[in-house]
Amino acid sequence: MFEGREMSLEQAIDKGIMDLQSFLNGLQCQLRTLAAMDDLSEDPAEDFKEMIAYTDKADDAIDDMEMLFAELKDVTKQILGPCPKVLSQWYKDHKRVRKEQAATAWARRKEEKAAAREFNAGVAAMQQ
């Protein structure tokens, strides 16, 4: 089952990847358009409203991709199938380690993001 419909595993994989590619292409267009929208008019409030429309579309594409990624994780579980009983402890440990690795990577990305913000704020202050 994928997107609430019965389909073969191969169809689910192909559909999920094609949908992701489509959302990524749309997101790229939205972000590029948004980036090119500097000083559209004399009215910053109107510019902001117009930019929000593109931001909303980008956010919608990201939300849709997050749902697709969740469904694709389910597809990988379907491919894998149930864990053999003889490996149940190993698999439990493996999942724990993966969870810890993900938490560490998340914390590192968060620190990198904070450092980038600090750097950008310093650059902006120097330009003033």
Image: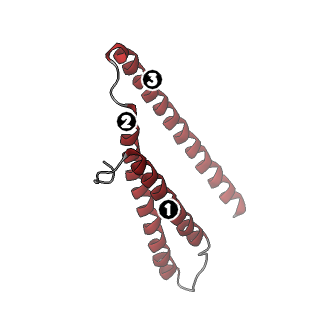
Looking at numbered disc 1 in the image, what kind of residue is underneath it?
A: Ser
Q: How far separated are the C-alphas under marks 1 and 3?
A: 33 Å
| Image vertical order of residue 44 relative to residue 118, above or below | below
- Observer-side mark, 1 or 3, equals 1
Element type at mark 2: helix
Residue depicted at 59% across the width and 50% down the height: 117
Q: Earlier in the sequence, mark 2 or mark 3?
A: 2
Q: Position of residue 39 (x, y in %)?
A: 60, 79
The residue that disc 3 covers is 97
Element type at mark 3: helix
The quarter of the displayed image where residue 89 is located: top left
- Observer-side mark, 2 or 3, equals 2
User: Decide: marks 2, 3 in contact (CB < 8 A)?
Assistant: no
Say whether residue 121 is left or right of residue 106: right
Q: Position of residue 53 (x, y in %)?
A: 44, 74
Q: Quadrant of the C terminus?
A: bottom right
Badge number at residue 106: none
Q: Position of residue 51 (x, y in %)?
A: 50, 74
Looking at numbered disc 3 in the image, what kind of residue is underneath it?
A: Val
Looking at numbered disc 2 in the image, what kind of residue is underneath it?
A: Lys
Q: How far separated are the C-alphas under marks 1 and 2?
A: 24 Å
Q: Earlier in the sequence, mark 1 or mark 3?
A: 1
Badge number at residue 22: 1
The residue that disc 2 covers is 77
Q: Earlier in the sequence, mark 1 or mark 2?
A: 1
